[in-house]
């Protein structure tokens, strides 16, 4: 356990997360949160810990079995193999479809538009994944269980 | 901050009613979770992925309600209600609302 004294910013972040700052002080701190991602991350982490403490309920018998299953190599293998085959199948199907389209005796219109639509869809998914990845570390609710 | 579903805070007098406060959120599970949940739907039992999703939404909505109440200078929120509905498949909306109040100081 660290013996380090908390910095002034850490103390401020704790007071903010606990709702103990006076209105003017809170407004000033919120202005800083907008400009300082690291500080925002600190507050998010404190909220995450507070949420975990709020849920310090005794585990249920089913939880032990879920944990055992999650650790079991057979269960993990089944899920991994399932996802791998499913993903590979989807990718293969997409590649096969594009090849068929390329070889087909059709006008250039679908040959251009279909790959364009697929590329567009992939870009949209990429944008959504990027947005989630960027905001994930500020989301204190991701560890809430039930 | 006292949050209660009752209309009053036992042992404390309500000095002032500030008004309605609410917190809401819509959260979604990712596609992989939806697939796993769908598979569990085939065999029955708890779909813990959706239990977690609802719990996340509930806690976020509660925090937003509390933040609004705090910003309006409340000491407590009484008559708390929870409401949930599904906006899109695999997403959960959670709304929490109540009445923000100021409490009289504790009499010694």
Image: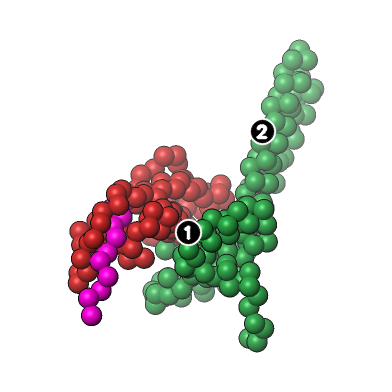
Would residue A77 be found to the left or right of residue A110 on screen? left
Query: What is the letter of the red chain?
Result: B
CB atoms at circles 2 and 1 under 8 Å apart?
no
Which hue is chain A drawn in? Answer: green
Residue B97 badge: none
Question: Where is mark 1, residue-wise?
Answer: A23
Q: Name the element at disc 2.
A: helix
The spot of residue A18 in percent (x, y) is 47, 68
Dot 2 or dot 1: first in sequence order is 1
Would residue A130 be found to the left or right of residue A61 on screen? right
Q: Quadrant of the C terminus of chain A?
A: bottom left
With respect to residue A77, does A110 lie above or below?
A: above
The spot of residue A57 in percent (x, y) is 39, 74
For the point 28% across and 57% down, which residue is it?
B101
Q: Which of A103/A55 is in front? A: A55
Residues at discs 2 and 1 both on one chain:
yes
């Amino acid at each position: 356990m660290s013996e380090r004294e908390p910095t002034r910013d850490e103390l401020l972040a704790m007071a903010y997360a606990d709702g103990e700052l006076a209105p003017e002080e809170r407004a000033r701190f919120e202005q800083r949160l907008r400009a300082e991602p690291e500080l925002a991350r600190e507050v998010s982490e404190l909220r995450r810990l507070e949420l975990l403490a709020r849920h310090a309920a005794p585990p249920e018998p089913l939880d032990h079995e879920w944990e055992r299953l999650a650790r079991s190599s057979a269960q993990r293998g089944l899920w991994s193999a399932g996802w791998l085959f499913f993903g590979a199948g989807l990718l293969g199907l997409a590649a096969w479809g594009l090849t068929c389209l390329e070889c087909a005796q059709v006008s250039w219109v679908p040959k251009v538009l279909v790959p364009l639509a697929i590329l567009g869809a992939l870009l949209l998914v990429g944008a959504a994944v990027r947005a989630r990845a960027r905001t994930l570390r500020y989301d204190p609710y991701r560890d809430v269980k039930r | 901050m006292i949050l209660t579903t009752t209309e009053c805070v036992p042992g404390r007098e309500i000095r002032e009613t500030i008004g309605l406060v609410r917190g809401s959120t819509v959260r979604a599970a990712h596609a992989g979770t939806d697939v796993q949940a769908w598979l569990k739907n085939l065999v029955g039992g708890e779909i813990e992925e959706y239990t977690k999703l609802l719990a996340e939404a509930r806690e976020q909505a509660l925090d937003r309600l509390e933040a609004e109440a705090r910003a309006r200078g409340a000491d407590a929120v009484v008559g708390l209600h929870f409401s949930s509905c599904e906006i899109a498949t695999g997403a959960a909306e959670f709304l929490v609302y109540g009445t923000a109040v100021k409490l009289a100081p504790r009499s010694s």
